[in-house]
Image: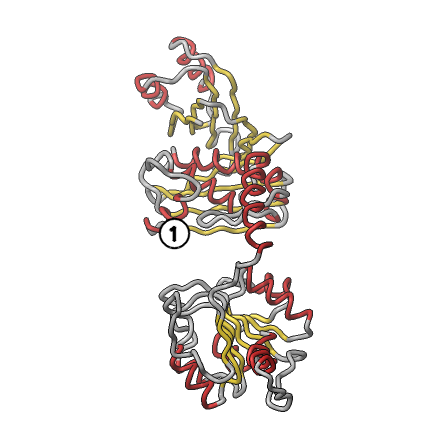
Amino acid sequence: MFAAARQLAAADASTQAGKWEKNRFMGRELYAKTLGLIGCGNIGGIVADRSLGLKMKVVAYDPFLSLERAVQIGVEKVELEELLARADVISLHVPMTDKTKNILSRENLAKTKKGVIVINAARGGLVDEAALREGLESEHVAAAAFDVFTIEPAKENVLFGAPNFIATPHLGASTNEAQENVALQVAEQMADYLLSGAVTNALNMPSITAEEAPRLKPFAALAEKLGAFAGQIVDEGLTRLEIEYEGQVAALNTKPLTAALLSGLLRPLLQDVNMVSAPAILKERGTPFTESKRDLSPIYDSLIRVKVQTGGKWRTLAGTVVAGAPKIAEVKLMQLEAHFHPVMLFVNNSDKPGFIGALGTMLAEAGVNIATFHLGREAEGEDAIALVGVDQVVSDELLGRIKALPQVRYAKLIRF
């Protein structure tokens, strides 16, 4: 941007050729000009930060940039049409995809301000190079500087020799410091993951900073277990899913928590699913999915609730973290507190006398030891639930007899 604005490359070549063409190289100041960023991710955000230091106005077109993030980094989020009309300098920071190919097409270049400067150090093919050459020759485009080209190595290109055009051979990361930093970053990122569970610069899963990892770890364990519970009770297929974050957890980075929950949810239904593949699989299946956050939780500091629709009916579970350990806090909107036991018997029953005794007798006669027993109910004599941690696996035959009890509406063996 500096080189293009002040024609540094041409001025250098002229001066070293023995000329002194001071009046030829009339540049443009960047102060108070508008920089238009097409793409405002990591690199775009860094460019915005440097440009704000030059007292430039920064506008950004990026469908993935949230309004909150835009305010945080000091840029104005705009649509592409507005950026083209307002920007004195346009800098590209997007990957090469079907949607971004020729994003600065002949048509879009015609919409820019006369005297615009175009910078491309992102990917070749984002700009119509022939149309840009015409813009430079007509002086509609004041200058352009490219580090990348449609065909590389660029031994020849339509832009070569154009007035006020600067070219470099894809030098973006070609510094001693950059090469050393890459090696250090790889080592540091692996160390962070092994020591704290941090995942940074992830390509296909949510990133987790070293600071976030310790706080997220218990909630990730809770989310995965809630998902596993929900995935084992969608007996008639998963038709809709809702995840709610309440309280302090809503202020955390919930993307990895959602990925963990989806992984746990889909694992009982599909083989070979993990945090990376689960969100994509859910999308491919076309399952409607919503996620919401609430700053306050009525009872707990933090609560994660998952709602699954199966067979036209909703089943709801919620959990919290107590002293660093995940706990079940709610089933079918009925409150109870239960630890996740490796094997649990989940029973939905009518709250009538004799059920607990009958269930206990059945388990005892089958040689199944009860490790934990937790109850919840709507009100006396109405809908109730029992979560029973057991030390032995309940056989299908025993589960069938439990289901046959007159008070029982639903029974399922759950594994964690």
Q: Is residue 255 above or below residue 351?
A: below
Q: Position of residue 27 (x, y in %)?
A: 62, 84
Q: Nearer the viewer, residue 86 or 340?
A: 86
Give the crowd class for mark 1: few <14, some 14-19, many >=20 residues within 10 Å.
Answer: few
Colouring convention used in this rendered image of the protein: secondary structure
Left/right of residue 355 with respect to residue 175 in the rendered view: left
Left/right of residue 303 with respect to residue 362 in the rendered view: right
User: Which quadrant of the figure contains the N terminus?
Assistant: bottom right
Q: What SS does tag 1 mark?
A: loop
Q: Is residue 119 above or below residue 195?
A: below
Q: Position of residue 403 (x, y in %)?
A: 35, 23
The residue to which callout 1 is attached is 288
Quarter of the image for residue 186 reads: top right
The residue positioned 63% from the left and 38% from the top of the image is 300
Q: Nearer the viewer, residue 15 or 91?
A: 15
Q: Position of residue 67 (x, y in %)?
A: 57, 65
The residue positioned 66% from the left and 70% from the top of the image is 52
The residue positioned 47% from the left and 30% from the top of the image is 384
Quarter of the image for residue 211 reads: top right
Left/right of residue 97 with respect to residue 322 in the rendered view: left
Quarter of the image for residue 238 reads: top left
User: Which quadrant of the figure contains the C terminus?
Assistant: top left
Q: Nearer the viewer, residue 202 or 10?
A: 10
Left/right of residue 161 with respect to residue 187 in the rendered view: left
Q: Position of residue 256 (x, y in %)?
A: 51, 44
Q: Is residue 125 visible to the viewer in this orientation of the structure? A: yes
Q: Is residue 219 visible to the viewer in this orientation of the structure? A: no
Q: Amino acid at mark 1?
A: Pro
Q: Nearer the viewer, residue 123 or 17?
A: 17
